[in-house]
Image (cartoon, helix red, strand yellow):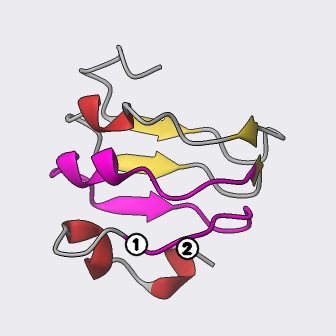
Amino acid sequence: MAKLVELIALNLSRNQLVGSIPSNIGEMQSLEFLDLSRNQLSCVIATSMANIEQLGVLDLSYNTLSGKIPIDTQLQSFNGSSFE
């Protein structure tokens, strides 16, 4: 999936995805919209997501994510509901 470097929007919500967010998701630097909500992802938030500087919409809610939101990144500017 991370090889889709020109992709601007990705919505994989409500797909019963299991596992983790790919660690190389940060290679998708053109992403402006990312919705992985309402799946069964159980992982920490990939630190490489901080490399997606154009990201304006992020929804990772309703998964079983753990750990901290990577600090000193634009990820901390998103509303808490993005990580619910």
Q: Main secondary structure of the magenta part?
A: loop
Does residue 38 appear left or right of residue 31 in this picture? right
Is the Cβ of the residue at disc 2 closer than 8 Å to that at disc 1?
Answer: yes
Amino acid at circle 2: Phe
Q: Nearer the viewer, mark 2 or mark 1?
A: 1
The tag on residue 83 is 2
71 sits left or right of 3 in the view: left
Q: Is residue 49 left or right of residue 38?
A: left
In the rendered image, the vertical position of residue 48 relative to residue 28, given as above or below: below
Percent across and percent down for residue 2 are 39, 22
Instruction: Give above or below for 5 relative to 65.
Output: above
Query: Seen from this angle, which residue lies furthest right?
Result: 16
Residue furthest to the front: 67
Label 2 environment density (alpha carbons within 10 Å; few <14, some 14–19, many ≥20): some
Horizontal and vertical percent for residue 11? 56, 41
Q: Which residue is mark 1?
A: 69
Of residues 26 and 67, the one nearer the viewer is 67
Disc 1 residue crowd, few under 14, some 14–19, many 20+, Cα 10 Å? some
Quadrant of the rendered image containing residue 27: top left
Residue 51 part of the magenta-drawn span: yes
Residue at the location (55% across, 42% down)?
A: 21
Q: What kind of element bears circle 1?
A: loop
Looking at the image, the residue that sits furthest to the top is 3
Q: Which residues are magenta?
A: 41-69
The secondary element bearing badge 2 is classed as loop
Looking at the image, which residue is at 30% across and 34% down?
8
Name the spot of residue 65 as percent of width and height, x first.
64, 64
Q: Amino acid at mark 1?
A: Ile
